[in-house]
Amino acid sequence: MQEALRFLSPGAEPVDRADFIERARQLRRGSDGSSRGLALTIRGLRKSFGDNEVLRGIDLHIPAGQFVAIVGRSGCGKSTLLRLIAGLETITAGTIGFSEETRPEDVRVMFQEPRLLPWARVLSNVEVGLGHERHLPDAQARAEGALVEVGLDEKRGQWPAVLSGGQKQRVALARALVSQPRVLAFDEPLGALDALTRISMQRLLERVWHDQGFTAILVTHDVSEAVALADRVLVIEYGGIAHDIEVDIPRPRRRGSAQLAALEGSILKNLLQGTEDTSDL
Amino acid sequence: MSLIDSLPRVGVPKLPRVDGLIPWIVPLAIILIWQVACVTGFVSARVLPAPSDVALAGWKLLLSGELARNIWVSFWRASVGFLIGGSIGFSFGLANGLSQTSSKLTDTTLQMVRNIPHLALIPLVILWFGIDESAKLFLVALGVFFPIYLNTLHGIRTVDPQLIEMGRIYGMSDGELFRRVIFPGALPSIFVGLRFALGIMWLTLIVAETIAASSGLGYMAMQAREFMLIDVVVLSILIYALLGKLADSASRALERLTLSWHPAFQKH
């Protein structure tokens, strides 16, 4: 509380309202910097589909509550890595360990397609996200809370068919959030959205990550999205981690700032170099 | 802009249910033309009796109780045969849609049987069951089995695999996955099967009753033919048309009720 008041005290430098809310949210996650998220340790992870080895030995530690973006060209294995973390594929070799015992509700995935049940209203689509807890008496209240979180509570009684692409994706986000996951994996969640909707969705993702303090793993082909959102960007090439880049640009980050652009440029250069290498093969 | 355009529009009182009457304009017009053609002698009564004569014949049969009895018998055969064949077809559709083993075991056999026109079995069925009730029920059941089976199977097979994966991720049990994802996803296709089956149901029943029966609408028509009662023959045909329309409307109503989520059934 004292820390929160510091922003209001006359001696502190002036802050605008959005900035204040942002910082207050950061404080809510625990003043000691702890987070609800789970840390993740991956050792010697390999994955093959038949003769095709997609991941060739990944070693990675993700601290609790970190926002990690995974970028790479299509087919580099970034989605496979995410699906392995989410438990959607079986591991060929190696281990993926979480810092604590996990319930199925602790790890959630959001896909590029919203994957809503067309025959269920928005609210019951969100209730699906509660997993085994959806039969508890507070299920509806929790689903409503998640819809408020993504700003769609007035659509609770609608069929998914009448929603726009961005709204559907927000319902999918509410469904992923409703069980209060400790790891949230995003597989190109904004890939099918138009540019403006994508920017507002990015802000929403950043906000809920601040609010809930889960560990976020975002697979994307959009490097500017990765540097805007993530604490750390992993570049995957040929089934391995080619670069591991810390993004120590303070939040809230301004879209189009020189710092972000410079970092984006250097990551893109790395990716493009990889392409030129393959042309020699 | 003229003065009239700028005046506020006075709401014209809407006639209730006018929309619902539009589909009946054409059938009523046909009956009217038919009546005129018969009364003026353009069409001989020996070829086609006037609608009024058909109605009169219907009235007489109604008074004698014969009409109600025959309609009831046909209706009973149709529904029981439909329920038997439909539920077996639905069960096989579910089993083969959900289980690879079941599909491998039975699908080839069912596809072979499907290619036999079921009405070709009438001689065999008469030898087996005589002209008993079971003969008609067997034929109707066999007729409705295949459209229900094929469309249930197709519906289940084409449920979006991404939705099934989503259901699994969110911890749905097999039963829940079926109830919340697979069955609703297959439902539009099942309804297509249902409506095909209703058509086949009437077709089969009428043919079976015409060939081998001692009661029912088909029997009534065949008996009337022997006595040259052309008005009763026409009456039977009109009743088939009405019953068929009734069955179709019922399945459409059910469809609207259960598929209200579907964009095609949403009111704008």
Image: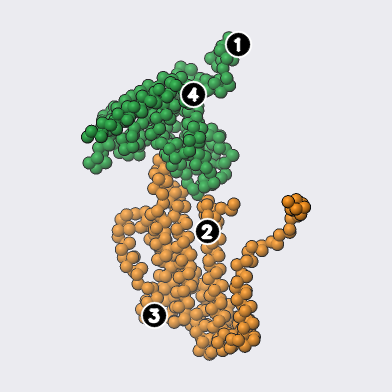
Chain colours: A green, B orange
Q: Do labels 1 and 3 share a chain?
A: no
User: What number is the disc on residue B255?
Assistant: 2
Question: Looking at the figure, which quarter contains the C terminus of chain A?
Answer: top left
CA gap, disc 3 to disc 2? 36 Å
Q: Are marks 2 and 4 on the same chain?
A: no
Identified at 42% across, 29% down, the residue is A224
User: What number is the disc on residue A10?
Assistant: 1
Single out the mark in the foreground, 3 or 2: 2
Identified at 31% across, 35% down, the residue is A76
Q: Mark 4 points at which residue?
A: A254
Q: Do labels 2 and 1 share a chain?
A: no
Label 4–label 1 contact, CB within 8 A = no
Residue A116 visible at all: yes
Q: Which chain carries label 3?
A: B
CA gap, disc 2 to disc 1? 66 Å
Label 2–label 4 contact, CB within 8 A = no
Single out the mark in the foreground, 2 or 1: 1
CA gap, disc 2 to disc 4? 51 Å
Residue B128 visible at all: no
Q: Residue furthest top?
A: A11
**Identity of the amino acid at label 2?**
Glu
Q: How many marks?
A: 4
**Identity of the amino acid at label 1?**
Pro
Q: Which chain carries label 1?
A: A
Question: Looking at the figure, which quarter contains the N terminus of chain A?
Answer: top right
Kind of element beneath mark 3: helix
The spot of residue A93 in percent (x, y) is: 25, 34
